[in-house]
Each structure stands twice: as structure tokens, then as C-alpha cells.
Image: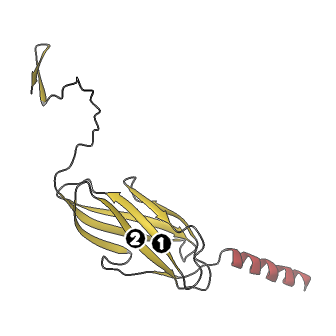
Amino acid sequence: MKNFVLLLLLTSILSSCGSKTTFEIVEDEFGGAQKELGSHNVGDSLSILYTVNNTGENNLLIKRVEPGCSCTVGTFTEDPIEPGQSGEIMLNYNVVLDNDSFQKPAEVFANVEGGMFEISFRGYGVGESTDSVSTNLAADEVVLDSLTMENDSVTTNQ
């Protein structure tokens, strides 16, 4: 009997530590967990908001958000989200692709069934891309359009 009570107590403690809850991603004009953002100019900074409702009986604890690439940064409500309350996840992205589509997923790790869920957004970049190479030129430096090399001599074309 003593072992049974101890086992029951241990089971109760372990089950309360890993309490799972349920949630829903609120739909807005761009969608729910998968957002359709449409066309955006190259260079635009996008902040994509996901509202998460806790529909369960336990606090929803978002542990971390891992975007699929380093070009996307995620922030989230770090405090426990009580049952019936809402929290937010924000993904920030700078449009860098010209005349091309982009799709960016992120994994959200939380105390939900399976331990995580995925959110994503996609859109289309329009306009001209800027060079990804950053240059800091002094006032007396010259930027050359092209260089031509023949027989160990260099010709500049401006």
C-alpha cells in the first residue's frame, strides 16, 4: 500500500510538470499559421504578427521560436499565457529578393502536443535588389565600373 501511494504521488508530480495545453492561431487578413503577404518592395522591413490563443486548461509556455534561416528574427510573449488569454509571436524579415518569391517558416517550441508547431509566411519581392556588399568609401576614393586586365596591366573603365 505504501508503494502504491508513493507511485501515485510520483505519477501525479510528473504529469503536472509536463502539462500540455491546446492553442489556436488567430486568423487575420493575411491568414492564420500560414500568412500570404502578397508583393512587397525590395528593402521593405516586414513585421508579421501571429496571435496565439490559449484554448487549453493549463498555461501556454512558449519556450523559443526558431526561424528557418538567419534572415528572419522571431520574438514572442515570454510570460505564461493563461487559459483563455492570448500571446504574440512576431517574425521580422527584410525583403531582399527582387522579382522572386520568398517563403519563411519558423518552429515554435511550447508545451503543446508534439512539443512544437510551425508558422510561416510567404510573399513576392518586387523592384531592384541592392548589392549585398556594403562599401564605406572615403571622399578621395573612386568606385570603378569595371576593370580590364591585359598582359599584367590594368585598365579602368569608368
Secondary structure of the residue carrying tag 1 is: strand
In the rendering, which numbered label is found on residue 49? 2
Image: 152 above or below 26: above
Image: 72 above or below 114: above
State the colouring used for the structure image: secondary structure
- How many marks the image carries: the answer is 2
Quarter containing the C terminus: top left
Residue reaching furthest to the top: 152
Of mark 1 and mark 2, the one earlier in the sequence is 2
**Left or right side of 94 for 23:** right
For the residues marked 1 and 2, what is the alpha-carbon distance in whole angstroms? Answer: 7 Å
Do the CB atoms of the residues marked 1 and 2 lie less than 8 Å apart?
A: yes
Residue 97 location, x and y as percent?
23, 54
In the rendering, which numbered label is found on residue 113? none
**Left or right side of 121 for 158:** left
The residue shown at (75%, 81%) is: 12
Q: For residue 148, which quarter of the picture?
A: top left
Residue 132 location, x and y as percent?
27, 43
The residue shown at (37%, 78%) is: 32
Residue 64 location, x and y as percent?
53, 63
**Left or right side of 42 for 22:** right
Of 63 and 77, which appears nearest the observer? 77
Secondary structure of the residue carrying tag 2 is: strand
Residue 48 location, x and y as percent?
37, 67
Q: What residue type is labelled 2?
A: Leu
**Left or right side of 50 for 44:** left
Of 152 and 85, which appears nearest the observer? 85
Of 143 and 116, which appears nearest the observer? 143
In the rendering, which numbered label is found on residue 88? 1
Image: 138 above or below 32: above
The residue shown at (32%, 62%) is: 46
Q: What residue type is labelled 1?
A: Glu
